[in-house]
Image (cartoon, rainbow, N blue to C red):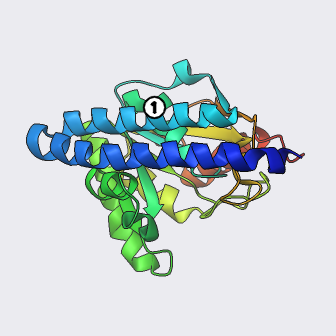
Amino acid sequence: MQKIISYPISAVYYIVFSLCLLVFHPIQWICLNVFGYQAHKKSVDYLNFCLLRCTNLVGTTYKIENRETIPMGVPIIFVSNHQSMYDIIAMIWYFRRFHCKFVSKKELGSGIPSVSYNLKHGGSVLIDRKDPKQAIPAIKGLSEYIEKYKRSAVIFPEGTRSKTGKPKEFAQNGVKILCKYAPSAYVVPVSINNSWKMVKFGFFPVGLGNRLTFTVHKALAVKDYNFADLMEMTEKAVVEGVNEYK
C-alpha cells in the first residue's frame, strides 16, 4: 500500500528535487569563479539544506546524535557505513562546519547537475574502483588537504551502499592512506540507520515516512593507535551502531 501511495508523492518530490539541482548549478559556478572557495562552500551547504527539505515532502526526518563530541580545529576522517545518496546530503548539511570532502566513485563526477560540479571542484576526490593505483594518489592528496586546512574527509569503506542496511565488510586501504598522510587527524566513526529505506523500492518511488539517524561515536586520534587497532575499533563502533537490519 505504501508503494502505491508513494508514486504520486514521489513524482512531485523528484520534480522539486531536480529543480533544486538545476537552480544551484549556475549558483555554484558563480560563487566559485567570482567569489572563491568560501562562497562556493556556502552555496553547497544551502543546496543540501534545500535537498533535505525536499525529503520532508516524503515524510523523512533526521536525528543527529553526539555531533557536539566531534573535535574542532583538527583534521577529521569520518568513517561511516553507506546506505543511499541521502547519507551524503545529510552529512554535508549537518556536518557543514567541518567542510566535508568525499571519496567518491568517478561515475558521479559527470552528468548530475550541481552534484558532479561540487565533487569535481569542491575538494572531493573521484576514484576509479577498477583501478586501485589511481585511487592511491587521489586519496593521498585529499589527506594532505585536510591536514593542511583542518577540514574533513568522508569515506565509506564498504565500497558500495548496502541495500538492506546490513553493513558490508570494511576495506582498509582508503582509511589507511588518509591516516598515514593526515597524522594529526581524528577518526570519527558514524553509524547511519534507515537511509536504505528511502530507496527500498529502487529509485522510484521513494520510501515514505522514514527517520534517518546519524550516530557519532567517540573520536579516535590517529597518533594514539596503531592502524590495525584503530581500524578494528572504528569498524566495531560503526557496525554496532547500525541496528535496523538486526
Q: Which quarter of the picture shows residue 66?
A: top right
Quadrant occupied by the C terminus:
top right
Q: Nearer the viewer, residue 212 or 101?
A: 212
Numbered disc total? 1
Can residue 196 be seen in this snapshot?
no
244 sits to left or right of 82? right
Looking at the image, the residue that sits furthest to the front is: 8
Residue indicated by mark 1: 49
**Image x and y of residue 64, in percent:** 62, 26
**Element under disc 1:** helix
The residue located at (38%, 27%) in the rendering is 97
**Image x and y of residue 1, in percent:** 89, 46
Looking at the image, the residue that sits furthest to the bottom is: 130
**Image x and y of residue 59, in percent:** 70, 32
Q: Nearer the viewer, residue 210 or 152?
A: 210
Q: Nearer the viewer, residue 60 or 73?
A: 60
63 sits to left or right of 141? right
187 sits to left or right of 232? left
